[in-house]
């Protein structure tokens, strides 16, 4: 499975080039804005502008609101056989 080949796309449906499975993941890098104190490295709450340890809920909200504009790189992987495509960049 070390061969890096192209994902197969037929009629808008992605499939694995090795096993033919349609269980394909798109793994992409997203832009996440994070604010931290320049001197201490501690996280800063952007709403209150105070140093605060973010809760898991706040981290999830920030992650879900991350921008997909300007994605740096992405790759495809198959959930069935473990195949991984080459890395694509903009």
Image (spheres, grey):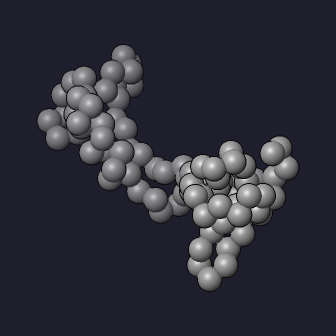
Q: In this orientation, does residue 62 appear?
A: yes
- Picture quarter containing residue 67? bottom left
- Picture quarter containing residue 43? top left
10 and 46: which one is in front? Answer: 10
Give above or below for 89 relative to 79: below
Residue at image x 66%, y 66%?
15
Left or right of residue 19, residue 46 in this image: left
Quarter that holds the C terminus: bottom right
Picture coordinates of residue 4, whole percent (x, y): 81, 52
Q: Hey, which residue is sitting farthest right in the picture?
A: 3
Residue at image x 81%, y 45%?
1
Residue at image x 59%, y 74%?
13
Give above or below for 69 relative to 60: below
Left or right of residue 62, residue 11 in this image: right
Picture coordinates of residue 33, whole percent (x, y): 38, 44
Picture coordinates of residue 20, whole percent (x, y): 71, 63
2 and 35: which one is in front? Answer: 2
Left or right of residue 72, residue 7 in this image: right
81 and 54: which one is in front? Answer: 81
Give above or below for 6 relative to 65: below
Picture coordinates of residue 82, whole percent (x, y): 68, 45
């Amino acid at each position: 499975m070390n061969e890096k080949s192209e994902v197969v796309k037929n009629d808008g449906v992605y499939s694995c080039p090795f096993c033919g499975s349609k269980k394909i993941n798109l793994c992409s890098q997203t832009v996440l804005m994070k604010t931290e104190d320049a001197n201490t490295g501690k996280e800063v709450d952007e709403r209150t502008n105070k140093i605060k340890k973010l809760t898991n809920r706040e981290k999830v909200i920030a992650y879900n609101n991350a921008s997909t504009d300007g994605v740096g790189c992405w790759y495809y992987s198959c959930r069935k056989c473990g195949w991984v495509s080459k890395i694509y960049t903009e």
